[in-house]
Image (cartoon, rainbow, N blue to C red):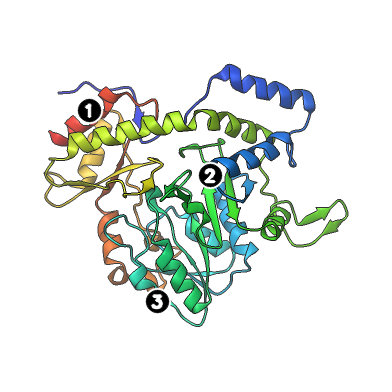
Amino acid sequence: MLAKKDPIYVTQPFMPPLEEFNEYLKDIWDSRWLTNNGKFHIQLEQELCDYLGVKHLSLFSNGTLALIVALNTLRITGEVITTPFSFVATTHALHWNSIKPVFVDIEPDYFNLDVSKIEAAITPKTTAIMPVHVYGNPCYTEKIDTIAKTYGLRVIYDACHAFGVTQNENSVLNSGDLSVLSFHATKVFNTFEGGAIICHDEGTKKRIDFLKNFGFADEVTVVSPGINAKMNEIQAAFGLLQLKYLDENRIKRKIIADLYREQLKNTPGISMLYDIPGVKHSYNYFPIVVTKDYKISRDKLYETFKEYNIFSRRYFYPLISEFSTYSALSSSNPDNLPVATSIAKQVLCLPIYPSLDLQDVKDICEIINS
C-alpha cells in the first residue's frame, strides 16, 4: 500500500527563479509604468509572435475576455456552432455577445468537434463556427475551413490548450479567422492570468486593440464601445520569463506523458490519447478514458486518488450543454451528443507539470493498475 503523499494536483504552474522575476519588478517599480501598453507588454507581443510563428498577436488580461472580444471583432451574431466538450468559458463568451450556441457532437478519437456533423447544424442564422483544440490536439482545420467557405461562415478557434502546437511545422494558431489563447496559471505558458488573440492582418489587430482598451483610438477619440481587457506590465514580465524556460518544460512534460503511456499501456479498461503524427504537442493535460472494462468507475477512481492526496480532474464534466444556462437548448439534448455524453462520464486528467517527480507518476500508475 502506498503512503499518503503531499498534495499532487492535476497541474502546477511553473515558477521561474524569484531573483530573475525581481529584476523585472524593479524595472517596473522604477519606471512607474504599470499598464497601458508598457515596454514589457510590447516586448512580449513581439516575442510571442516570433515563438509561435504568427503575424499578429494582441495580449489580454485573461482568455475569457479574449474570446468575448474575438467574437465582437468579427461582429458575430445569431447562432454559432460549437462543442459541448470544453471549459464553460467557450460558450459563456457567446452568451455575453447575445449569440446562441448550437452544440455539435465530438469525434471519439481526440474529442474535437465532429466535422461530419457540422453541416447538418447550419441554419440561416448561423454566422460562425467556434471549435476547440481539445487538450491541444488540432481539429480537422482544413475540413472546417472548407465548410466555412462553402457557407460563408467565420471561424474562431478556442486554442486555449494549443500554445506552441504545430502541425507539419505550421502553427495551428494560423487556422481560421482568429485563434484565442489562455495564459491562465494552469496552462503550459502562463502570465498568472492572461490570454491573447491571434489574427492575420494589421487592420484586424488594430480593431482588437481598440476593443480591449475602451475603444480609444487616441486620447480624445473613441471609435467603438470597447472594454478594459488589457494585460498589465507585471503579467507581461512574468510571461517573458516563462518563455525562457518553455522548451525545457515542454520536454519534461513529454517525458511524463511517455512514462504514463508506458506504465498504462497494458491496463485493461484504460485508454489514452496518443500523439498525432506530424504534430508538436503542448502536453498541457494527460487525459485517460476509464471504460466499462476497468475494475471500478471513473468517479470511484477519482475519489480513490484523493485518499492518497492526488487530485485528478474530470475534465470536461459535466458537459457545457448540461449546465442549467444551456440545457434547455434543443442542441443540448443528450441524444444529439452521444459521444460527448459518453466521454464526459469516462475521462480523467492525470497530474502533469514540469516539476512532477517521475516516481510520483509511477505511483499514480500503480494505484490505477492495482
What residue lies at 18% left-to-right and 23% top-to-bottom? 2
Look at mark 1 in the image and give the residue it sits on: 362
- Give the residue type that dot 3 points to: Glu
Mark 2: few/some/many CA within 10 Å (<14, 14-19, 20+): some
Mark earlier in primary sequence (1, 2):
2
Mark earlier in primary sequence (2, 3):
2
- Give the residue type that dot 2 points to: Leu
Look at mark 2 in the image and give the residue it sits on: 52
What residue lies at 70% left-to-right and 53% top-to-bottom? 209
Mark 1: few/some/many CA within 10 Å (<14, 14-19, 20+): some
Residue furthest top in the image:
19
Q: Nearer the viewer, mark 1 or mark 3?
A: 3
Task: Say which element carries label 1.
Answer: helix
Look at mark 3 in the image and give the residue it sits on: 119
Q: CA distance from mark 1 to mark 2?
A: 33 Å
Does residue 117 appear left or right of residue 223 in this picture?
left
Q: CA distance from mark 2 to mark 3?
A: 31 Å
Above or below 26: residue 120: below
